[in-house]
Image (tube, grey):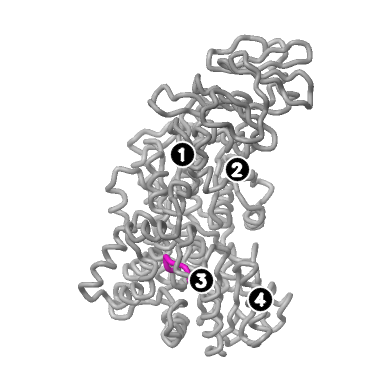
Amino acid sequence: MTASSVCAHPPPDEPFRALRGSAVTLSLGRVEVTYAVPGRLPRIAVAGRPLPVEDAPPAQDEAAFALAAGPDSILVSDRDERLAVLVPRDGSSLPEAQASLYTTRPDPRRAGRFRVTVHGPSAGTGALYVAQAFGHTTGWVPAVHGALARLPEPIPFTAAIRRQEDAAHARSKAESSAGLHVVPLRYSDSESATITPSDVANIARPELLNREAALLWIADNLELAQAGAGAAAIVNDCRPETWILHQLAEHAQQKEVPLHTVRYAFEEFPCLRQLAGRARSSEPATGVAELLAASAPAIHTRRELQDALRASGTDVRRNPSADFEAASREITVRLPRNGTIWYQAVDWRDRLSLESGKRPYVVVPPLGQASELCPEQAAERAGAVLAQRWAALRYLFTPRDPRGVALVSQGNGFSTRSRQHWSTMLALAARMEETQFLFAGGSAEDRAWLARELERRPRANVTLLGWINEHWSTLLRALRAKPRAAFVCRPGLSSIGAALANGVPPLLMSPDPLAGPDGTVDAITAEVAMERAVYAFQLERLYATQCAQYPDSPLPVLVDTLGDDKQKALTTLRRAMEPDVQSRQRAAIDGYCDWSRVAHLIASVLAREAVSGALPTPVKRRVRDRELLPRRDPSGAGRGCHGGPRPGRLDQERRARTPVSGHG
């Protein structure tokens, strides 16, 4: 915008910018902000009344205030007019209209709510992925980015990631990190997760209204807000504040912007509770009975969860993510009518109960990153990587080394029982000298503890790998080359997805119980306890479906790393490593779906919607069923040996710039 056009009067709801010599004045409603001297704070007035820029939130009865917000912004609120504005501290970029201004004001379409708007430039972002969880930053993000890059008409891809180390993992696993744009994601569950579109006081900070708290969140996430305003499609992983980005995108572009929400297992919580309840009155199948016994401390009712949180002093109104189930439902309720819920289920074809509901579910398998190597190639590569530090492991994954292999990982996910999981695996390793145990991941504290334990009591068959970043998929695929192998992991969806994508059956550790070792409930533990239990039962259902010819010989799903019976855990692990059991499980996984298609399906839908707008849900379901149709490979040896997914029917359609009808 040139200096001459800056003075043109905008529409009534647009900020008015005026140049008077070197000074720049912004006005909106009764709010006036004047930048007189570059590098100094502006003069701010509401209804002609000057306001100082405060560093602390105002009193609840203040009619107007100006508050320092984030590193570079000022929040100005005119409460009598129900208007709040976020302006830059430095006005040097305003004459050329290079800075965006953010406002919140009443939503004319919904009484008692407000809308977030943006005024200023917004470059096209393409697909924006708000990736909160570690599994998404290391699984979904690089996989979808790679699939988007391989499309005939690639679209830009931006990921919002909280932790720098997670961003580094995502870049290291991306096929071309140069094409992966990462912006920081900053939030506090006890504050930003409580922001809703309701125009009332914020629960976490009652001195602020939600419309003011929303602008403070933007002030902490300016780069993300700018990316959100230009997003052609948005994917949300768990973050309650993503509705702010979606409103910014639709206001900036003046059109409907597709929104996808990736959800986990909460829809199956009632089914698991019913299963556990029936088990008390009747004898369940053998495999299910073992899962119920090992998972019982994690399976809880809504009342038990609420009582436990109350006893621990956790207020879910101020920490919504502590009640994972309720928070998940709230996010899906906020999804627009044309939005999509990518529900990650292990047994994706057993989905009728999900799709019969009112919400637009599209069920897909959990997404992990698949190695491009076939098992034999991965075995050579993994051995070479290990040999850089441990020469004796050079041929561990090849026929030249007769030892079995147990790859054990706890990722970096939170667990109050992580030491107990590790201790059990150390005890099992002491009784399985014929097997080489590779311990990967875990927190820095746990890795230090493991090092001390092995220094105090050395075990030749235990190797501490630490963090395996870009070689992780290679190690998983290398397990396919060993007849006697096992991948033991905590029951998180990122671990399960990575294992299944590489054709490896995961053997799950026990889900952490709701209560911690001291009897209290940690908010994060409450968030994931039931979710982790569900995945074991989803895997059991998958095996029961794929291997129905063995009804009396259920395949191992869970090794009880928290139980007192170490002999039972030892028996489970040894059976899981038997070649015939591995063969049956691998065949079940190979018949589950073509894993190279999962990221391709999501990327293809995102690309189409970025051009043509949201597709009707029935169309997306039909595309899913067509794209994920199993393509069996009896040997399993050829998995991932090609450079990318085979061209699917979706690519063969005229999709680039043609609107899609509801008939598909």
- Mark 4 vs 3, N-terminal side: 4
User: Which corner quadrant holds the C terminus?
Assistant: top left
Q: Is residue 516 magenta?
A: yes
The residue carrying mark 2 is 158
In depth, the one of 617 and 88 nearer the eye is 88
- Position of residue 32 relative to residue 457, above or below, is above
The residue carrying mark 3 is 417
Q: Position of residue 26 (x, y in %)?
A: 65, 17
Question: Is 54 on the left or on the right of 36, as rendered?
Answer: left
The residue carrying mark 1 is 259
Crowding at dot 1, Cα within 10 Å, few <14 / some 14-19 / many 20+, comes out as: many
In depth, the one of 328 and 435 nearer the eye is 328
In depth, the one of 613 and 559 nearer the eye is 559
The residue carrying mark 4 is 383
Q: Position of residue 203 (x, y in %)?
A: 47, 41
Which residues make up the magenta segment? 513-517
Q: Is residue 507 magenta?
A: no
Question: Is 409 on the left or on the right of 537, as rendered?
Answer: right
- Mark 2 vs 4, N-terminal side: 2
Q: Position of residue 258 (x, y in %)?
A: 46, 36
